Image (cartoon, rainbow, N blue to C red):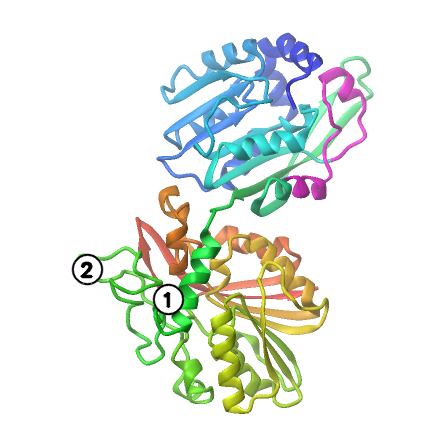
Amino acid sequence: MSMTQAAATYFERVAGNWDELRAGYFPEAVREAAIAKAYLRPEMVVADVGSGAGFLASALAPLVSRVYALDGSATMLDVARRNLTGFTNVTFQATDGATLPLPDASLDAVFANMYLHHCPDPAAAINEMTRVLKPGGRLVITDLDAHTHAWMAAEMADEWLGFDRGQVKAWLRGADLVNVIVDCTSQSCCATSQTDTADQAQISVFVATGSRRVTGAQEAVQASYGAAAAGQGCDCSSIAEPAGSCCGPSANAMDLIDTGAAGQPITLWMTGYTAEQVAAVPAEAAQIALGCGNPTALAALRPGEVVLDIGSGGGIDAFYAARRVGAAGRVIGLDMTPAMIERARRAAAQAGLRQVEFRLGQAEAMPVEDDTVDVILSNCVINLCEDKGRVFEEAYRVLRSGGRLAISDMVSDGPFPSSLRGDPARWAGCVHGALPEREYLDLVAAAGFTDVEAAHSLSGGGIEGVQVYSLSVSARKG
């Protein structure tokens, strides 16, 4: 993982004219793509690993509280100091990359631009960068797609001739990062051999992102919704009071939501169910409706279809779907909380709905066979899952070709402070696990879905200056 002698020699030699060389290799649009994926806030502390002459650090400094510019070349760092003299919030530190000179869980984001292909062990480099991320912190890597220009290894001390995107994704997931996306920047790196000008390269550049897990978040969610199923917790979107605010100050699942001047929660929760829809489901399910929208309204369910409800809870969406698909159809309710499964099964038996079954399992690893489902529903559940990317990949796996995704979920218009997003106790409130809308939809598309459409739904509010709201999302497989 540490810098090789060949790389050290190369960067010492080119440091003096690196800015000119870099401008010929790749444009400012590469760093803009990286920054756009980081969802930065002014109070954040970030690192630029392999910072070189300060190309990325100079763009980060105006956006955050502090930037650590880390590089293995002392000469490069000297150039960076001269380039960034106008910034007082940049700290320059030498490192060979084997061990970053920063404490565990100390950074909100780590960037690595054109660094990974100089690392002998990219997986170890990714693990080390993950180590210094706070819970919920983001890793952002921009680098070269796989190519065949072997002369670049000889002339530029490249250890790798770019990377296969699938391999990069596997490395990020191997570091236990969640919501991993490896995508195109629509930019290229251009280079010409110094020994043979006929050797020219134009290589596409990818951007890879992932976030560090929040330890204990899933356990907190499961405990809270288990209590709700047992009648000891919060009913976050009471059907009886659809325009009411979600839970009171002493409620279980939502008591950590910000309060307004009158001491009432800012976030209001509405499902959009009609009285007719509520009357069509077992009363016990209607009493524990914890959603933020009405995904069945999007789904256009047809008789005979197979439906999967992710995070089925008390079963209201599953039961209403069962009425729509009829006796020839089938509905599978999936939930990770045993108490919810027991309650939903009891309600199904009492209502005589034999085409509905409830399975215990995680949305990130669904106990459902490949290509067996026509429609997937989910109502304010995926935001509670840490790895939403995995959830969408699983949804894609179990859907038949042409199958439909119809979900309601909570998203935000920007990132939350790390003090909120990284606190596992807050995740059960249907807000702190919400992603920025753009990232959420990127994850849907990255799973392979097409025809992705989204519209603001009924629930919404704010916390710490960040707007949160429910989003109705539809998409199709294939």
- Looking at the image, which is closer to me, 280 or 134? 134
Q: What amino acid is labelled 1 in the image?
A: Ser
The C terminus: image quadrant: bottom right
Q: From the viewer's perspective, tell me whether residue 186 is left or right of residue 38.
A: right
Residue 114 in the image, given as x and y percentages of width and height:
63, 27
The residue under the point 45% across, 52% down is 217
- Looking at the image, which is closer to me, 286 or 168? 286
Local secondary structure at mark 1: strand
- Looking at the image, which is closer to me, 224 or 23? 224
Disc 1 target residue:
459
Which residue lies most toward the left here?
A: 262
Residue depth check, mark 1 versus mark 2: number of the one nearer the observer = 2
Q: Is residue 269 visible?
A: yes
Q: Is residue 46 above or below residue 345?
A: above
Q: Is residue 312 above or below residue 363?
A: below
Residue 431 in the image, given as x and y percentages of width and height:
39, 57
The residue under the point 72% across, 69% down is 371
The residue under the point 71% across, 40% down is 167
- Total count of labels: 2
Residue 448 in the image, given as x and y percentages of width and height:
66, 57
Residue 151 highlighted magenta (yes or no):
yes
Q: Which residues are magenta?
A: 146-171
Instruction: Give the mark nearest the N terminus, 1 or 2.
Output: 2
Q: What amino acid is labelled 2 in the image?
A: Gly
The residue under the point 64% across, 20% down is 2
Residue 328 highlighted magenta (yes or no):
no
- Looking at the image, which is closer to me, 312 or 84? 312
Residue 248 in the image, given as x and y percentages of width and height:
26, 66
Local secondary structure at mark 2: loop
The N terminus: image quadrant: top right
Label at residue 263: 2
Question: Within 10 angstroms of label 1, few (less than 14), some, or many (20 or more) residues?
Answer: many
